[in-house]
Structure formats: structure tokens, C-alpha cells
Amino acid sequence: MFPKKCPGCANNLKVEKLICDNCNTEIRGEYSLPLLMKLSEPEQEFIIQFLLYSGSLKKMAKKLKVSYPTVRNKLDNMRDKIISIQKEEGENDR
Amino acid sequence: MTGKFNFKNFIINPFKYVAGYKSLFIGLLFLIGSAVINYYENIHFDGIIDIHYNSYGGILLYFGEGIFNWLLLALLLYLGTKIVGNLSYRSIDLFGTQLFARIPFFFASLLYVITPIRKFSKYIFWKYLNKGSQVVLTSLDYIFLTAGLLLVLFIIIYTVYLMYKSYSFVTNMKRKKAVLSFIIIFIIAEFVSKIFFLIFLPVENLGL
């Protein structure tokens, strides 16, 4: 599992180094994780499924054998989470 | 998110698995089942969460009671969501799951048949209202009666819980808001239903 939180203080982790595995070029800096990477793995999986079903919650619910409100609530809760992450990022950038 | 069916999860929140037209159809089947049992056993659902014994009315009345109780609460909850806030949900999910939430009442009707609750009701009618023939209750009747009444009480509590769960889950309302608005709407619905049944089914018919 890709680590996103510091195991010591639970703060958000940042990327310090990127490496090209072809020519071993290293890029160093302090990069924040992309927004989607800040979501949990099940949430990322949900987004992939959502795209694969062309955004049809009905089809998704049928395939996952859950009710429509279950999928809908999951989507709404993720939207709220993304909004709060964006707000947090906005405050940090100021 | 997995769709693996888990019985415990289903009891806690069946609406994770069933909603929309499916819940409406299943709920309707159980409502018809309850109406048939109630007709033959003289059990009335004369209020949102009321179960009483009395012998009056045709099969349509028993069916109508179920429909009225379901629609009244579902409509008031629907109107409530319009007042509470800008919630995006499908109304069929609210109406369907509200009907599904009433399924335990089918089992309450069955309990009236298989336990001495009905016999006890007849006893009350004979002893205190001088109606019907003499009824004698044995000590074994009292034991099963207590067990039956406790089960009916549990069914009523569970039904109210399901009604709340349907409302809060389908609308994805924040907990505090959902609890408060549900309590208010539920009390209004119970009050309106009692008034309605008192008007259309006068006290003299109830024999109380």
C-alpha cells in the first residue's frame, strides 16, 4: 500500500525524490501528493469503477450487488472529502 | 466497497442492499400478506405503529390501513427533506424503503396468530367490555403471552429503527439533523394517523 501519512506523527507525507528507472535520473524537490492519491485505496478503486461504468450509478449498484443509495452516498461522501481536501490545500498554499 | 451479502449487515441496514422499486415490490407483498392475516384474525394497524384487535371492516379496510400508514409517514418524511435542506436523492428510494421498513409488522401479525395475544384480547373484550363468549386463560397462556408481547414490542422498536434508517440512509442526511427531523415528523405522523382513524373508524366501532 502506498504510504500517505507519516507513521510517526500522522502528518501528510510529501514526495522528495523521483527516479527514472531507465537512465537513473533523479529529481529532488518537495512535491505534494496529487489530490486523487490522497484518497484511500477503496475510494480510488471506486473512482476507477465509476469511470468504467461511464458514471452510471445504477449499473454500478447492480454490478456490485448493492442498492443505488449505497453507491450514491459513497459518491456524495467522496465529493465532500475532495472539497475538504481542496479547502485544506488552499489554506496551506496561502 | 463490496457487495458481499452479510446477514448481520442486512439486519442493521437492509437498505444497503435493497432500495427503489425492488424494496417497494417486496414491501407491497408483505403488506398484502399482513392484510390477509389481519382480515382473518381481526388485527388492525390503526396508527403508524399501532396494532390492535377488533372485529370490524372488510379486507379492503385492512389493506387500506397498511397503505395509509405507509404513505402518510413517507409523504411527511418526503416533505421534511424538502424543508430540511437541498438533498439529492430519488423519491422512489424513500417511498420504497419506507414500505420495506414495515415488513416486521407482518411478523407481528403472525405472532398474534401463533401466540395467545389474540386470545388475551378476546379475554379483555369478554371480561371488561362484556363482548363475545367466555375466555379462560391458563398459566401456560400467560407465559406465551408475555413472550409474544415482548416480541411484538421488539418488532415495533425494530420497525421504527428501520423507518429512521430508511430516511437517514436514502437521503444521506447528517446524523444530528436526521435524528431530530425524524423524531418531529414521526410524532406528527402518529398524531395525524390517530386523528384519521378516530374520524373514519369511530370509537364505538373500536369497542374501546
Image: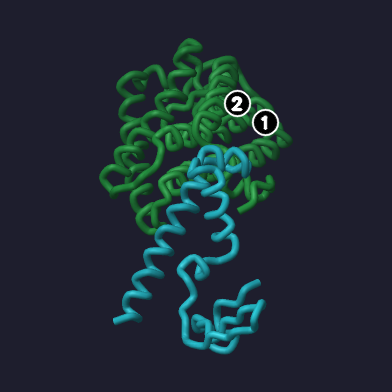
Residue that label 1 marks:
B115
Quadrant of image for the N terminus of chain A: bottom right
Of residues B163 and A19, which is closer to you in this image?
Answer: A19
Residue closest to the eye, B29 or B112: B29
- The colour chain A appears in is cyan
Residue at 33% across, 36% down:
B76
A2 over A15 or under it: above or below: above
Three-letter code for the amino acid on which mark 1 is drawn: Thr
Residue B112 at what x, y percent from top left?
61, 28
> The C terminus of chain A appears in which quarter of the rendering?
bottom left
**Chain containing the residue with disc 2:** B
Amino acid found under the numbered disc labelled 2: Arg
Q: Position of residue B74 (x, y in %)?
A: 39, 34
The quadrant holding residue B143 is top right
- Identify by letter the chain in green: B
Q: Is residue A67 above or below residue B58?
A: below
| Quarter of the rendering containing residue A91 | bottom left
Mark 2 → mark 1, Cα distance in angstroms = 7 Å
